[in-house]
Image (cartoon, grey):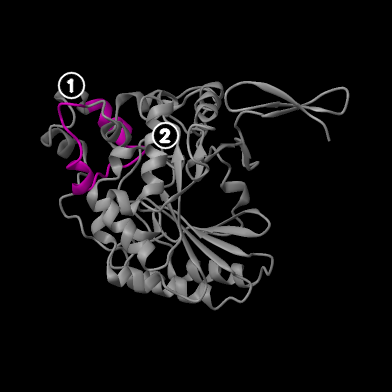
Amino acid sequence: MKPARNLVQSLQPQAITSPESLLNAGLIPPDHLAAVSEASATLPISITSHIAGLIDPALPDSPIAKQFVPAGLENNKQDGELADPIGDIPHSPIAGIVHRYPDRVLLTPVLTCPVYCRFCFRREAVGDGLLTGTDLDAALDYIRNHAEIWEVILSGGDPLIMSPRRLTQIIDALDKIDHVAVIRIHTRVPVVDPIRITGSLVTALKRKTPVYIVLHCNHADELVLEAEQAIATLVDHGFPMLSQSVLLKGINDDPEVMAALMKKLVSSRVKPYYLHHGDKAQGTSHFRTTLAAGRAIVAKLRGRLSGLCQPTYMLDIPGGHGKVPAAEDYLQATDDDDWVVNDWQGNTHIYHD
């Protein structure tokens, strides 16, 4: 990795990036400064001016503040928490590539984000840096040389923090690889730094190969007017949009709160895709619910919300073994080769094959 300078677009000179700037903005009290400084040694601080404007200093437990303002609880590491909770490292054959599943790879050209979510599962890796030109060329060659790769997922870091010039170079290269049929971009930019969604960025992404944009959004309060306008810009230019959310204790671990988020996403033309169970990243236990709690929330969404609003609840098995659906089971086999079916209201029925 090399420092992210010219190839990362800087549009937020007023971003909050230090414990002292948090204190000056009134987002932490003076007696929290030492603990927040300790937490920031592991995961950097970055809060865009847009997100800072959504945080009321008088409401430190608001859904926005809790996602982005560091807390001393991050310094409490629990047994079973991991530096690489989803096992990226064992599946990374070269810098910038994670090849966990046969037909798709993760390409991580940048480790910088416009904001750093305090529950980040890559908290040990993210920060200031881009793949060097040599490493990026090697990563692209890896994709060219593996014909089984059907989809390339740009992640990081946040790919949309890169300048349009850098994005153009990467998207151009991927567009020219015959066996790459789909490009997917994982981003938080439309909701945390919507000013970045410009005509130049749209031009950088638009190619023959379809580009899907997966928006990370965890609470309806993130979908303010500026965010909705940024989403509309992308959708109106033909980019299909999906969402991924993380189930977070004290933020969205309530059926009504989750329903409001999913409805607002769909009304913004973003299809809910994944709801992730919290990963076992070090210092994040205060964000994690139990699986039982998550399954109960998802079960309450079924039947009460349109099918368009239903995310798939996913567990990433620690150690790099991949994702599996974690939601309630609606079918149980019987000894008579029949099935007991649970409907969304909790009633049971017998289904005969």
Frontmost residue, 259 versus 194: 259
Frontmost residue, 6 versus 103: 103
Q: Could you tell me which residue is drawn at 15 percent across and 39 percent down?
A: 21
- Marks 2 and 1 close (CB-CB < 8 Å): no
Q: Position of residue 292 (x, y in %)?
A: 56, 21
The residue at which mark 2 appears reads as: 259
- Asked whether the viewer can see residue 253, the reply is no
Quote the CA–CA distance across marks 2 and 1. 36 Å
Q: Give the secondary structure at mark 1.
A: helix
Residue 147 placement: quadrant: bottom right
| Mark toward the start of the polypeptide (2 vs 1) | 1
* Above or below 336: residue 211: below
Q: What residue type is labelled 1?
A: Asp
Frontmost residue, 155 versus 7: 155
Q: Could you tell me which residue is drawn at 61 percent across and 57 percent down?
A: 93
The residue at which mark 1 appears reads as: 31
Q: Does the magenta stretch include residue 51?
A: yes
Q: Where is residue 149 in the image (x, y as percent from the top left)?
A: 64, 64
- Asked whether the viewer can see residue 331, the reply is yes
Q: Is residue 271 magenta?
A: no
Callout 1 crowding tier (Cα within 10 Å): few <14, some 14–19, many ≥20: few
**Picture disc at residue 203:** none
Q: Could you tell me which residue is drawn at 18 percent across and 36 percent down?
A: 22
Residue at the far bottom in the pictured view: 176
Frontmost residue, 121 versus 128: 121
| Quadrant that contains the N terminus | bottom left
Q: Position of residue 46 (x, y in %)?
A: 27, 45
Q: Could you tell me which residue is drawn at 22 percent across and 27 percent down?
A: 60
Instruction: Give the magenta range.
Output: 34-59
Depth-wise, is mark 2 or mark 1 nearer the camera?
2
